[in-house]
Amino acid sequence: MVKKEDKLKLICITLILDSLFVYILKLSENSLKDVCFLATALASHLVFYYGLISNDRRTLDILHYGVFVLLSASMSVDSVYIKKVCLLLLFGIKYLWYQEGRCILNEENEIFGYGDEAEQFVNTTIPALIGQIGAHYQIKEWFIDGALSFL
């Protein structure tokens, strides 16, 4: 059973993500890939709320893997806003692991979420998303001209 304090953190984080995803869905132009990603994320979050409230460990374990699948899928979407939200989540996961010394979705004696693989995934996905986000924005000519004038 996930601790009450951890449930509250997880619900708050998920509500923030849901709010941002709905905002992106409603207020920006999205490709089919973006809409599919957002629909999958929002639907999985509904199941996640159910799993947390009902303490359905099997559902939570499946969705635990699903987080990494969705974060991987975020690298193939077109929307820079979705990429930014996923980057925010990755930084949040990294911060919580550092602060708590464990994954907060785990029960006391569980070890899911520890290990080099999860840490390597986060550490490689963060710069990949940063690179994709940075590539979306074009450097203005005035910036290049200004930089070259100093040389």
Image: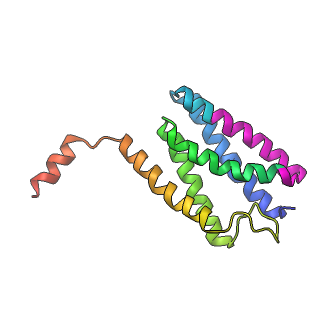
Residue segment shown in magenta: 38-58
Quadrant occupied by the C terminus: bottom left
Helix, strand or loop for the magenta stretch, by majority: helix
Magenta stretch: residue 50 in it? yes
Relative image position of residue 79 (x, y in whole percent) = 49, 36
Relative image position of residue 137 (x, y in whole percent) = 35, 41
Relative image position of residue 1 (x, y in whole percent) = 87, 62
Snapshot colouring: rainbow
List the single residue furthest toward the front. Answer: 117
Relative image position of residue 126 (x, y in whole percent) = 49, 56
The residue closer to the viewer here, 62 or 85, is 62
Q: Looking at the image, is 145 positioned above or below residue 150?
A: above
The residue closer to the viewer here, 130 or 117, is 117
Q: Looking at the image, is 142 positioned above or below residue 114?
A: above
Magenta stretch: residue 43 in it? yes
Q: Residue at x 51, y 44 (%)?
A: 75
Q: Looking at the image, is 103 positioned above or below residue 48?
A: below
Query: How many marks overall?
Result: 0
Left or right: 24 with respect to 40?
left
Left or right: 12 with respect to 52?
left
Left or right: 124 with respect to 35?
left
Q: Residue at x 55, y 43 (%)?
A: 74
Q: Looking at the image, is 101 positioned above or below residue 73?
A: below
Q: Residue at x 83, y 61 (%)?
A: 2
The residue closer to the viewer here, 46 or 62, is 62
